[in-house]
Amino acid sequence: MPFPKKLSTFVSPVYILLPMPESIKVYAPATVANVTCGFDVLGFAVNNPGDEVELKLTSKPGVTIKRITGDNGRLSLDPQKNTAGISIFKYLQHYGIDKGVEMTLHKKMPLGSGLGSSAASSAAGVFAISRLLGRTETAIELLPFAMEGEFIACGSAHADNVGPALFGGFVLIRSYDPLDVVKIPTPENLFTTILHPQIEVETKDARNILPRFIPLKDAIVQWGNVGGLIAGLMLKDLGLISRSLQDVIIEPKRAILLPGFYEAKHEALQAGALGGGISGSGPSIFQLSKDESTAIKVGEAMEAVYKDLGIGCEVYISRVNTDGPVILG
Amino acid sequence: MPFPKKLSTFVSPVYILLPMPESIKVYAPATVANVTCGFDVLGFAVNNPGDEVELKLTSKPGVTIKRITGDNGRLSLDPQKNTAGISIFKYLQHYGIDKGVEMTLHKKMPLGSGLGSSAASSAAGVFAISRLLGRTETAIELLPFAMEGEFIACGSAHADNVGPALFGGFVLIRSYDPLDVVKIPTPENLFTTILHPQIEVETKDARNILPRFIPLKDAIVQWGNVGGLIAGLMLKDLGLISRSLQDVIIEPKRAILLPGFYEAKHEALQAGALGGGISGSGPSIFQLSKDESTAIKVGEAMEAVYKDLGIGCEVYISRVNTDGPVILG
């Protein structure tokens, strides 16, 4: 089918312009933000789970939400209250495009799980409208619109989920003011295990539990590890990645909100994980592994911990996503 | 002459064993530690200035210091009180080598300047004894002995000067406990300008002026920049290096001890520098530039500031050193 096809390039994807379709279906990945030592600055995308957005051109101007599936009725059908809806709206408004679109959103991941659910919808939405209109904006050009969606969802325009959701791979938010986003080359065959336990963690509580001041000596340990993690990813040095996946500042505070976290982490490392931590502000836990078979063992080991605790959980195993959003049809 | 020749490799130098000489002369580079955001974790070596160590095998066991030049008589001739002497002593002791060596040390840089003077001597000393004995230890193997020299000089076994002095290039000290040192691939043709103003800064004062606690939000800015700087160096992205060369935590405190610092920094950036900051704990100021002609202009611009202030200074221009110690003869 004649859809825009993606060419992969290093810093930012480039797209070939092909004839404009009437409708489009786009997948965008879930993301892990706050990658251990990289609190607020480092995130990555995974191949599973993720959200899907279907868009169709209509005669009615603006954005209409036709249907949302997989959210158990929790999300509003008002496009101004939906992260994908607002991202598409801001895109159309910014470019002065006088078109109407009707959206169907398939939530294929749990809400409030710390997996960048709102970011996946925003990224899918803004990528879908761009490609539906036969346009070619790059990930960095689409990022501000997806960040508007995050603003609706979180009250602040974070980029550590929408960044990796749009770019794929590991993404460093070097600075927010001005916005400076760097795609970090990532080893192939890096797999993730994500465990989402049935625990409620309010983002607000996860924020409030953090101290406003931290010891300088801990901050130095943390930025040594950030340097090591970035270098490890770029050198494809799994040992260095593993040694750098440490968080001496945020994790010790937030783990209090997550029963079973330390036990699951211990079992994951025993099962061969490179390392990991809390995904976003939780409750999901992520681990990185050198291959799929290890990632599966890590999932089984963590799942057993939560089974013993009598806490239900979902486990996702996938390769680290390196493509960002993709057109499904 | 039949000296060990160095083969350059990526992580750590490897050496070809050649017949043992009776004496050796080694150069080791000055180093910039606390590279802006990389306080305590990131340093790099420069081609100028640096120290020279001459060693000669003698019949008298242990280490004897024959002469020190360039120190204005400030350094002790007691090998147990000299950073190069102690490094050589620890090396011989560790390997149970029952040889005697006589050392001449040529200090070719100012003492107490924030340029890793003691580290250059230690690195030159331990590299010289290794090669004089026809041995082949790598930089990472020599590092602990050079750190013993730093312990004498500073009272703590820092590695952010001796690391780059031995490895060359940019070196990340990811962790001290356990010691984890990473050589960061560095763009070719990166030049430094170092200005050493005639200001006394006691390392103790420079330490005491730092807060024990810092705002978490500043720490996040700092580790975003550390990630950006490592990525920028490895991607050879001069723009990213430039944007990441920021220190929101240490510099604002220590600059108080350095009259003219902000003016010199401003003029350096105006003259085209990528960025820079305080070298070590000062008083030297470093700047990085994309080529030699810019580095020269940057030096002139900073020198003019100190001339106006009536403060004398020395300026060094050189390529970032990528080789570590070299055998001169």
Image (tube, coloured by chain):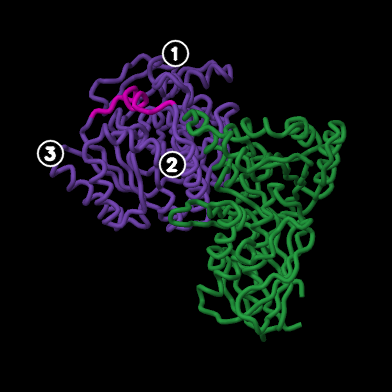
Chain colours: A green, B purple
Instruction: Say above or below: A295 vs B94.
Output: below
| Chain at tag 2 | B
Secondary structure beneath dot 2 equals loop
Secondary structure beneath dot 1 equals loop
From the image, which quarter does the C terminus of chain B lie in? top left
| Residue type at the position of mark 1 | Lys
Sooner in the amino-acid sequence: mark 1 or mark 2: 2
Residue at 58 percent across and 46 percent down: it is: A231
**Distance between the Cα atoms at labels 1 and 3?**
50 Å
Task: Evaluate if marks 1 and 2 touch, with contact meaning CB atoms under 8 Å apart.
Answer: no
Which span is picked out in magenta? B200-212
Q: Is residue B233 left or right of residue A317?
A: left
- Return the x and y of residue A91 as percentages of the image width and height: 56, 71
Secondary structure beneath dot 3 equals loop
Sooner in the amino-acid sequence: mark 1 or mark 3: 1
**Residue that numbered label 3 is attached to:** B310
Whether labels 1 and 3 share one chain: yes
Which numbered mark, 2 or 3, is in the foreground of this view?
2
| Residue type at the position of mark 3 | Gly
Residue at 84 percent across and 31 percent down: it is: A309
Q: Kindly tell me whether residue B309 is visible in this rendering.
A: yes
Q: Which mark is residue B60?
A: 1
**Residue that numbered label 2 is attached to:** B37
- Return the x and y of residue B12 as percentages of the image width and height: 57, 41
Q: Is residue B120 magenta?
A: no
Q: Is residue B265 left or right of residue A164?
A: left
